[in-house]
Amino acid sequence: MSRKAPGNQKHMSAEDRAYIEDALKRGMNMVDIAKYLKKDPTTI
């Protein structure tokens, strides 16, 4: 769970997962994806 966003859900939503898939296809790195989603990079 991210320390940056109190109350952040433990699990990722379907929308978060779709964003990750699309971002990876576009060549984004894990750190940038994690920042956008307000998650720890190890979660991605």
Image (spheres, grey):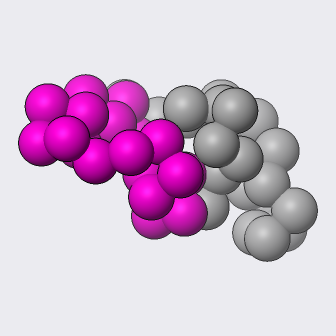
Identify the main secondary structure in magenta. helix
Quarter of the image where one finds residue 9 = top right
* Depicted 30 relative to depicted 38: above or below: above
Residue 33 image position (x, y, % from top left): 43, 51
* Depicted 12 relative to depicted 36: above or below: above
Residue located 71% across and 47% down the image: 40
Q: Is residue 28 magenta?
A: yes
Q: Nearer the viewer, residue 31 or 44?
A: 31
Residue 4 image position (x, y, % from top left): 79, 70
* Depicted 6 relative to depicted 40: above or below: below
Q: Nearer the viewer, residue 31 or 37?
A: 31
* Depicted 5 relative to depicted 31: above or below: below
Q: Nearer the viewer, residue 10 or 43?
A: 43
Residue located 54% across and 63% down the image: 35
Residue 38 image position (x, y, % from top left): 61, 61
Magenta stretch, residue numbers: 15-36
Q: Decide if residue 31 is on the left or right side of residue 24.
A: right
Q: Is residue 32 magenta?
A: yes
Residue located 25% across and 34% down the image: 24
Quarter of the image where one finds residue 8 = bottom right
Residue located 79% across and 54% down the image: 2
Can residue 8 be seen at all in this image of the molecule? yes
Can residue 9 be seen at all in this image of the molecule? no
Q: Decide if residue 41 is on the left or right side of residue 34.
A: right
Image quarter of the C terminus: top right
Q: Nearer the viewer, residue 2 or 30?
A: 30
Image quarter of the N terminus: top right
* Residue farthest toward the left in the current orientation of the protein: 26
Q: Decide if residue 35 is on the left or right side of residue 40.
A: left
